[in-house]
Image: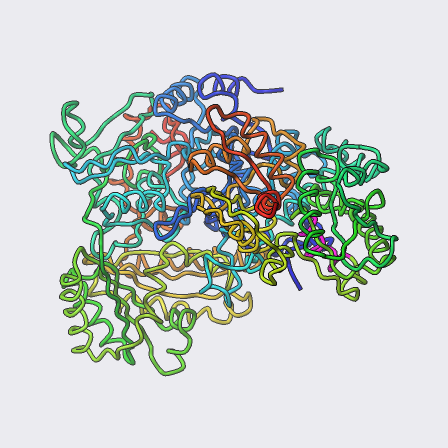
Amino acid sequence: MENSLSVKLKEIVGSKYVSDDEYVRWSYSMDSNIYDVLDPAPPLVVVRPGTVDEISEILKLANKSKVPVYTRGGGTDGGGSRGTKVRESILIDITRLNNVVKIDEASQTVTVEAGATWGKLNKEVEEKGWRLGYKGPYSGYGSTVGGSVAVQSNGYGSTKYGVVAEDLTNLKIVLPNGEILETGSAVNPSAKKFYRYCIGPDLTGIFIGSGGCFGVIAEVTLRLYPKAVANALGAYGFRDYDSCQECYYRWLKTREADHVAWFAEDGLKVNSPDLSEKGYVSMLTFAVEDQTQDLVDARARLLHKVADEQCGEGLDADKYARGDWDYKFELLPRWAAKIGQWQWNCHMIPAGDALKDLKAVLGFLNQHEEEFKKHNVTHSTVSIAHKNAGHVSTSMYYDQNNPEAVILVKRLCDKYAELAISKNGGCNYWLGKIWYPYTIMRNPVYRNLLIKVKKAVDPNNVMNPGGLTLPSNLEREA
Amino acid sequence: MSTRSRRGRTLEDYRQEIYLCSRCGYCRDMVRARDATDLVCPIREKTGGFDSFTARGRNIIARGILEGKLDPKKISPEFVDTLFACTLCGSCQDHCLSLDPKTWDAFPNNEFTDHKVDVLGITESLRSIVIEKGDPPAIIRQVLKNIQLHGNPEGRPRNKRGGFLKELDFHVKTAGEGKCETLLYVGSTASYNERNQKTVKAITKILHVSNVDFCVLSNEEEDSGGDVLRLGEEGLFEELARRNLALFKKYGIRNLICVSPHDYDAFVNDYPVYMEEWPKLAINVPHYTEFIAELIRNRKIKIRQKLDKTVIFHDPCYLGRINGVYEAPREVVKATGARIVEMKSSRRNSYCCGGGGGGVWYEALHKPRLQTERATQACETHADILAVACPICAQMLEEGMTDIEKCDMKVQDVAEILLEAMT
């Protein structure tokens, strides 16, 4: 017997796009992260709206019925941003809203529906002679632009352009009560979507990294850059960590690399074991792309000069750096097939403190080496740079079919986060249960303000209740 | 040994592969800036598009069953529809990056078997659960019953299987009429369908005028069981395979020319793993386009009039993407002098006609009509002919063309096109 909620949702989006079938719901029970592996949670009903107005009607219905709403994009969430009431929720699968709405030459921006994948967006802007600064997370073929904004992702291009938020000019949000909010310059109905910090306070920021707790991100506008016609790559091996840190720091200081990656010892063993065998403790790689060959050459020259000064030993860039850049978005599933499902432990750390953090992290991993070996878990630590910050990420690769390995990785992820965030002073940029106990939960002033904002924007607490560690029951907390 | 075949594996036997899925979602969307990839799952695009339609979603469901969180005895009608709506076109598997590491550098031009998660096999094993439970869609049940009782999906009389070849103005040897090393295996789809009988007649004429010594099994021919296996009925497939094996042994078949890529796939990939004796027979199995392309290369084919036409070729999933045969049908068309242009979705990115995996019989709940979409894509090229090399594709795309106004494009088998140039 069909439930009344489904009937009402079908009136909004059409019967084709609503399902409360047990098997269909189950196919939405997990994303990529280990929390979902341990506790898959199928929603109450899945709905696939095709327009912003339909989202608005769904949220009005949810508010009236006091049913939780969880919004899902590509389903590649690696940190565990789902709240506590997914099983009772309407899950909005946003991927029917997947159009590139407008490439506005005058504004040098692209407006895209939230359910479009990064793969699609990159392709379409490049076909029109542009490129994105931040190009999407490592899962970019499958992950959506809206999802990245909601969980604040980093990835390709972050070294030069920062995380997704930093090229973001405007959002279109469906608020929990169904109202549609435009942010940035689009607050002015006569204005184009071209600027974020104008008109009044930056409300855009509330929704970035919000985990879908304050509304549904429906459209995103991003800055564009001229299409790259050339690129250059570099790879350097280091036999001591201090030289590597110095090179890494100076590369970031130049602000000339589009992508910088630091493969620590364990990362080298996994990615380039031949270099480990030759006695290197680290490898640094860079990628530069630009609109003319001259610009690329000049920028690459500077980076090569720094590496030479820091005693980096030049390596075959085609062998060691090209794959990471040219085959962007393709690496993680490949590694999953080779050594197991990944669980990231990412955090940012000041560029100058990266080595201190890395050493602590590697020490921690070494302490648990026996356990890793026992359960066939592989770890790889790579630091991808973010402008002035190092982004240290240890991936733990495990067999999902080995319950003991799953439990081990979950336990060590928690400990790792405690070390990296509490002791080393790192910060998570994206969201998830891995980090909350060491960040939001430790700062009552910040968390209480979030609760107040939540109560103001979403008084019935329908949007991803329990997300961001906000209370499942707002009244009880109050 | 190919891993293409399900090899009798149950869902439990697929456990390792199911848990290998990283849920990256590339089976759902994988648009790459650096090449022409566009759409991964045509069925997802044309239905409700829930994750249950994707390989990732089905792997999550399979985990639910294996972990006892979903009761396989209570598979819902909606999921049954989802399972049988899938045309097993292999596109999701072909986009999956769970690759054998030795083959990373080849991507995206990998062999189909380089992909470590056997999405087709997992889907077939889920279908098997539905079949065993006795709850497949009614038309699927009927098709299986027809094949079991009559040796063909439509339940047509066995003694009418080969009659259409008597309409030719030359005699086509049947097995038993003397030596028969080279068998033209017509297959069920082509034996009874009038449209496809034309294709078979064209193939036999080409072989005849090229002086190929070949035979057919006529009414003695059995269904290959390829589609039966795809539908999840493994027991019936094994029975059919045994019968075919006995027939091929009885007549000393050395070359097995297949009209349908689906039969070709079964003989090439499934028979060797299900039938222990099969490899010992060392039967050479070409698709007819491969066989004819070889005749062309050996100058056994004489072209009398070059065709002044533009042709697009629709790659059948079970010939191209799944078995890697892309060039042979194009060689046959090129031999006629016709101009070949490629559709946007061609070769390994070919868009399924909608007929595979049982789609030719089962119309899913939301009527995806892939045949109409593919015919529309073809018409947008303004070519003269949409060439096919699969009886199911021919049937589906001709049907799709009827949905489109103002498109004069003809659907022709490559054998028909070649024959036109030969006469």
The colour scheme used here is rainbow
Residue sitting farthest toward the front: B304
Residue sitting farthest toward the left: A199
Q: Nearer the viewer, residue A473 or B241?
A: B241
Q: Is residue B6 left or right of residue B402?
A: right
Q: Is residue B110 above or below residue B312?
A: below
Q: Is residue A401 left or right of residue A91?
A: right
Percent across and percent down for residue B394 are 61, 38
Q: Is residue B238 above or below residue A272?
A: above
Q: Nearer the viewer, residue B272 or A378?
A: B272
Asked if residue B317 can be seen in this view, the reply is no
Residue sitting farthest toward the bottom: A278
Task: Name the magenta segment's main secondary structure.
Answer: helix
| Point 55% across, 65% down: residue | A375
Q: Is residue B271 magenta?
A: yes
Q: Is residue A202 left or right of residue B375?
A: left
Q: Quadrant of residue B179?
A: bottom right
Labels in figure, total: 0
Q: Is residue B22 above or below residue A275?
A: above
Asked if residue A377 can be seen in this view, the reply is yes
Q: Over which residues does the magenta segment extend? A: B263-274
Q: Is residue B264 above or below residue B128?
A: below
Percent across and percent down for residue B60 are 56, 44
Percent across and percent down for residue A322 are 33, 65
Q: Nearer the viewer, residue A230 or A74?
A: A230
- For the C terminus of chain B, the quadrant is top right
Percent across and percent down for residue A321 are 32, 67
Q: Is residue B391 left or right of residue A472?
A: right
